[in-house]
Image (cartoon, rainbow, N blue to C red):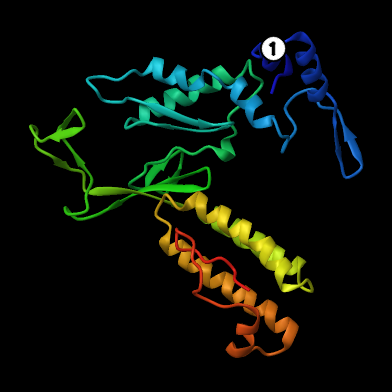
Amino acid sequence: MNHDYLLSKIHCPSSLKRDLKQWLKTGVLDHSVFEDTEAGTPQGGVISPILANIALLGMVRLIETMYPKKKGTVQATSIRYADDFVVISPSLEIIEQCKIVISEWLKPVGLEIKPEKTRICHTFKPIEYDGKTEEPGFNFLGFKIRQYPVGKYKSGKLGGRIKGGFLFNKTPHKMLGFKTNIKPSNKAIKYHTEVIKGVIKQLKTAPQSALISKLNPIIRGWSNYYSGVVSSETFNKLDNKIWLMLRTWTVSRCGKASYEKLRNYFRQGTVKLSNGVRDVQA
């Protein structure tokens, strides 16, 4: 990210801007090796996300201005969170145009679209693009967004108009033949499992109460984040995985563990979160 461009977008007292400039150029110490930072913001820095929001302000508006609604139909829409974004459109041609326009718009910012992190895909069916088959659906912020074929009773519908909070069926509904599902992505599930495994391994000889107090905020935070989407199957699988990992932890402390011995350490089914994922109980 171009520091001069970023600072030009920030309207604040000159003393604060001077401190921010020094913070950006202070350098990074990585494994005892110092590197200058003439561009970019520190990865993991506490204010890096808000600086990305400042630098990229206007990108979403650019897409909306280029492709306004036509007869109430959205041509293209962009959703951005810090430096992660997606552009959605029913037209492949518009998507390709948006990619070119955004690439040009990012140049003064000092950023570019990385080919290895960029996909053009369909949410419902596989497509052939750029010499390879792109599977349906995409990942965004730890979620997998995809559409699945369903029968008429579960299908999404188009038609009708809303007035005063009520839907008037003056136009016939059009069955779409698919339904949109949002689930935790496989990458997010794998990462969460590795975090849990790492905590259990780190506290292999710690008291049971220490392990519980460390695990519960992680489990509760992750499950709350995904509780608003289609996650029940994922929660059930993770619940079982965590239980097996805790069983292994117990075996390492008291030998071959029967369920009677396990009950001395943990008990199942006593407390559940509102989203169906168990807290670890002493």
Picture coordinates of residue 96 (x, y %)? 43, 27
Disc 1 is placed on an element classified as loop
Q: Image quarter for residue 50?
A: top right
Residue closest to the eye, 207 or 20: 207
- Relative horizontal placement of residue 109, taking residue 234 as reference (left or right): right
Look at the picture and state if 242 lies above or below 22.
Answer: below
Where is residue 19 drawn, in percent x and y?
A: 81, 18
Please give the residue where the numbered disc 1 appears in the rendered image: 12
Q: Is residue 241 above or below residue 88?
A: below
Work out which quarter of the rendered image holds the N terminus and state it: top right
Is 103 or 252 nearer to us in this picture?
252
In the rendered image, the residue lying farthest to the right is: 32
Q: Nearer the viewer, residue 163 or 124?
A: 163
| Mark 1 closeness class: few <14, some 14–19, many ≥20 residues within 10 Å | few
Could you say where residue 88 lies in the image, as x and y percent from the top left?
39, 32
**Which quadrant of the figure contains the C terminus?**
bottom right
Q: Is residue 131 above or below residue 77?
A: below
State left or right for residue 88 relative to residue 158: right
Which residue shows up at 13% across the image and 39% down it? 173
Q: Is residue 202 above or below residue 144?
A: below
Which residue appears at 33% of the width and 30% of the height? Answer: 91
| Amino acid, disc 1 | Cys
Q: Residue 80's x, y, as percent?
A: 51, 31
State the residue at coordinates (39%, 16%). Answer: 66
Q: Is residue 12 left or right of residue 124?
A: right
| Nearest to the observer: residue 217 or residue 194 | 217
